[in-house]
Structure formats: structure tokens, C-alpha cells
Image: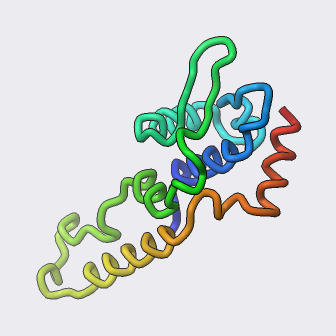
Amino acid sequence: MQLTRFTDFGLRVLMYLTQCRDRPAPVTIPEISERFGVSRNHLVKVVHFMARRGWVRTARGKGGGLALARPAGEYRLGEIVRELEGQGPLVDCRQPPCALDGSCLLAGALARSLQAFYAALDAHTLADLVREPTAAAIITLHRAA
């Protein structure tokens, strides 16, 4: 299984925001775009999605920026990835129609595996992801701002 860029960028944004509480300047989308070398337009879409979910707070205008909406320990990784991926079943047995539909066990096995994947991710929080040495690397990115 491979995560989408949308999910990748969302996780990077959330991780970056974990280390911004002591910064004098707000974190902005252009800043994150520059630090990670990713498209600003993609990040705008990701941040809007996460703001609608209540994961990040945004403020517009001069002095505006981004911040986590709650402490990093309250974000379950599985929940975040499930929402960012917005994925249905791993295989669609109806399109194109499969000759084995109704008598194949593959779709069920894949569905159980996907649930196990998310359950394993749910054992971790955003705070778990940004322990050392990751926290120090993020702070270094902030200092470049």
C-alpha cells in the first residue's frame, strides 16, 4: 500500500506544527512549502481539508498563520491517515466486473488487512512521531524561517 501525496503532505504539516508554540512568528503555508520543497497549491488544499476537520486553526491576514487545534498527543495517526486517504476498498470487484465476484475471498482478506493497518497506526499519536530526533530536525527547519 502506498499513501497519497495528500496524506504525506498532511502528515508533514501536522508534524511541523508540533514545534511552533514558542515561535514569535506564525507558521505559514509558503514557509512550510519552502521548507519541505512541496507545492504551495497542494498545501493550501491539504490545510483547508485539515481545518475543516478541526485539526488545525488558521488565521488570515497580517500576522495570520497555522497552528494545531489541540495538543499533539490527542491526534491518533490512524484517524488522520484514514481521513486524509479517504479510501474505499483496496479492490473494486464491480469495476470492471470480476468473474469471481461473489465467490472470491480476496476482497475480504484485503479489507481485514487494511483495518489491521489502521489499527496499528491508531496505536501512535502525532506526539509519538515528533520525539527526538524528529523534534530537533523540525526545530532546525523553523530556525530557517
Left-right relation of 144 to 23: right
When the figure is inspected, residue 13 is found, relative to residue 83, above or below; the finding is above
Q: Position of residue 12 (x, y in %)?
A: 64, 49
Q: Residue at position x 23%, y 87% from top? A: 105
- Looking at the picture, tell me which residue is in the foreground, 80 or 40: 80
Image quarter of residue 104:
bottom left
Q: Position of residue 76 (x, y in %)?
A: 50, 60
Q: Residue at position x 58%, y 56% from top? A: 73
Q: Residue at position x 54%, y 43% from top? A: 70
- Looking at the picture, tell me which residue is in the foreground, 144 or 131: 131
Q: Residue furthest top?
A: 62
When the figure is inspected, residue 106 is found, relative to residue 80, above or below; the finding is below
When the figure is inspected, residue 133 is found, relative to residue 16, above or below; the finding is below
Its colouring scheme is rainbow
Image quarter of residue 23:
top right
Q: Residue at position x 87%, y 46% from top? A: 140
Q: Position of residue 123 (x, y in %)?
A: 51, 72
Left-right relation of 4 to 39: left
Q: Residue furthest left?
A: 102
- Looking at the picture, tell me which residue is in the foreground, 133 or 36: 133
Query: How many numbered badges does the structure rendering display?
Result: 0
Image quarter of residue 54:
top left
Q: Position of residue 86 (x, y in %)?
A: 37, 53
**The C terminus appears in which quarter of the rendering?**
top right
Left-right relation of 82 to 106: right
